[in-house]
Image (cartoon, rainbow, N blue to C red):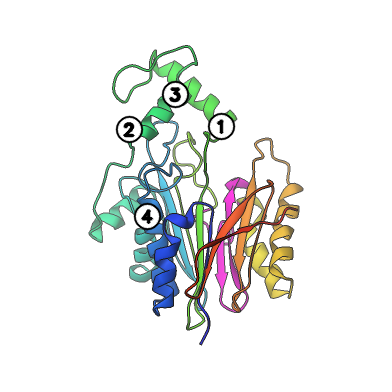
Amino acid sequence: MTRPVIVGSERSEAGLPAAAAMLAAGASALDAVEEALRRCEDNIEDHYVGTGGLPNARGEVELDASLMVGSSRAVGAVAALRGYPHPISVARRVLEALPQHCLLVGEGAALFAAEQGFETAELLTEEAWRLFCEALAPADEAVEGEHRPALEGDALYRARAMDLVARLSPHDGPWGTINVLALDESGELVSGVSTSGYPWKYPGRVGDSPVPGAGFYCDQRHGAAACTGRGELALRTGGARLVVERLARGEDPVAACRALLAEAAGVPDDFRAELRVLCLTPDGRHAGAASQAGATYNVVEGAGALTRVARALP
């Protein structure tokens, strides 16, 4: 019997302890990963996932999420999903109830969620709307009227929204996609990812988080990996798959994670931002790497307490 292990990116602490307790009691990795990410999606203090996520450039919250099972490499994912507070659970339903597909997006993802009986919710909280309005309004302008920036003509709004897309940077405080990787007592590996994506993104933008091989990958023979940060770099390098392929070659987890950052560093990108990666092996080893000093990830092994581990730098 395998000793359960669960690891998560920064801010996964909102859901990791409960999920770890489930694993210690014999739950499956799939159940544990879903539970961890649902709790993160319900954390309205977190503006980069679930309810309270920061909106796109039109003021609409679009959510992405994914799950992958290592033994079968089955995938369930949704992208640009609006109006449903638990995209990770919708992704799981895709995996289990729609096995002929891997990824649903936009209107189709919402149609499927409705057919499956998921409840809708208002995802744009007052705090997220305030941050949105402050980002759109000039520094010397007040924001007036509910759900509307000041001095907004259509042309001005579009110009300002496009400017935000071009120069977007995260607000102060913790930010980024949340990843959770779990190994259960049966030896099953599962990866899960949930995010609201870049703030102020162009409507319909989909990053790496719901794309297998880019933002996540899971193969029970070799390991699981997931990325946070500049999703376009993970898309362009096949980030998570690259890490798992390095594990398959026999590289240790730290070296495998560093290999992705080295690959990404060689890709031209005028919008370059931080990239982080996390991995977990079938024998319970784990590691992470980040392009920024001070980055950490969370881990719970067996019935132990949550600990934070520093990620290696390139």
In the rendered structure, does residue 208 fall within the stretch colored magenta?
A: no
Task: Tell me how far mark 1 sits from mark 3, CA to CA.
Answer: 13 Å
x%, y% of residue 11?
49, 51
Q: Can you tell which mark lies on residue 87? A: 4
Q: Which mark sits nearer the N-terminus, 4 or 2?
A: 4
Task: Tell me how far mark 2 sits from mark 1, CA to CA.
Answer: 21 Å
From which residue to which does the magenta span run? 209-234
At 54% from the left edge and 64% from the top edge, which residue is drawn?
299
x%, y% of residue 162?
52, 26
Going by the numbered disc 4, the residue's amino acid type is: Pro
Label 2 residue SS: helix
Q: Nearer the viewer, mark 1 or mark 3?
A: 3
Label 4 residue SS: helix
Q: Is residue 42 left or right of residue 267?
A: left
Task: Tell me how far mark 4 sits from mark 2, CA to CA.
Answer: 21 Å
Q: Nearer the viewer, mark 4 or mark 2?
A: 2
x%, y% of residue 171?
52, 33
Going by the numbered disc 1, the residue's amino acid type is: Leu
Residue at numbered disc 3: 134
Q: Which mark sits nearer the N-terminus, 1 or 4?
A: 4
